[in-house]
Amino acid sequence: MSGMEKPDPHGFIIETQVNYLPERSSESDQRFVFSYTISITNTGSTAAQLISRHWIITDANNHVQEVRGQGVVGEQPLLKPRQSFEYTSGTALTTQVGTMRGSYRMQAEDGTQFDVEIPQFVLSVPRVLH
């Protein structure tokens, strides 16, 4: 299940793929664990480095969790034109369905910084949404 592709004015395309991890989840403890794979592709003409991330995670009870941090999976990748960077991370919800959206702060070679929006995607235990 791929997220919506949305062109970014700076030429970055973000693609998302989500997997539910039943072996790491516990329905009785209301812990639902998901992994997500993000692919960031630079379709622009300028190299830029991913400096930090900002996530807004919302569960089915409208409980919002904000996560900010340096880089992604311990890296601050430099994406040259036509380069991609892919990584997998995870999150846990207390409900079977939720959403994630956010942004990456990028820094171009000339030092200017800009945000690349991460389009909202759905986290869902497979049997809940059909």
Image (cartoon, rainbow, N blue to C red):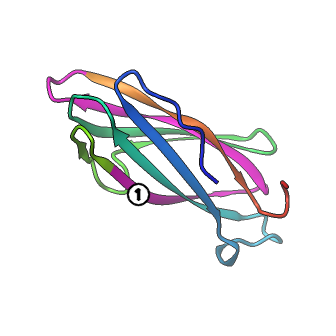
Q: Quadrant of the N terminus?
A: bottom right
Left or right: 21, with 89 as reference point: right
Name which residue lies at 38% across and 55% down.
86
Q: Position of residue 120 (x, y in %)?
A: 62, 37
Can you say whether 87 is above or below 27 in the image?
A: above
Left or right: 34, with 14 as reference point: right
Residue at label 1? 87
Can you say whether 98 is above or below 29 in the image?
A: above
User: Which residues fall within the magenta stretch?
Assistant: 85-112
Can you say whether 1 is above or below 121 in the image?
A: below
Q: Quadrant of the C terminus?
A: bottom right
Magenta residue check for 129: no
Name which residue lies at 81% across and 43% down.
61
Q: Position of residue 121 (x, y in %)?
A: 63, 43
- Give the quarter of the image for residue 64: top right
Most extreme residue toward the bottom, as rendered?
A: 23
Q: Amino acid at mark 1?
A: Tyr
Crowding near the residue tagged with mark 1, few <14, some 14–19, many ≥20 C-alpha atoms within 10 Å: few
Magenta residue check for 89: yes
Q: Position of residue 72 (x, y in %)?
A: 37, 50
User: How many numbered circles are shown?
Assistant: 1
The local secondary structure at tag 1 comes to strand
Can you say whether 98 is above or below 101 in the image?
A: below
| Chief secondary structure of the magenta portion | strand
Q: Position of residue 82 (x, y in %)?
A: 27, 41
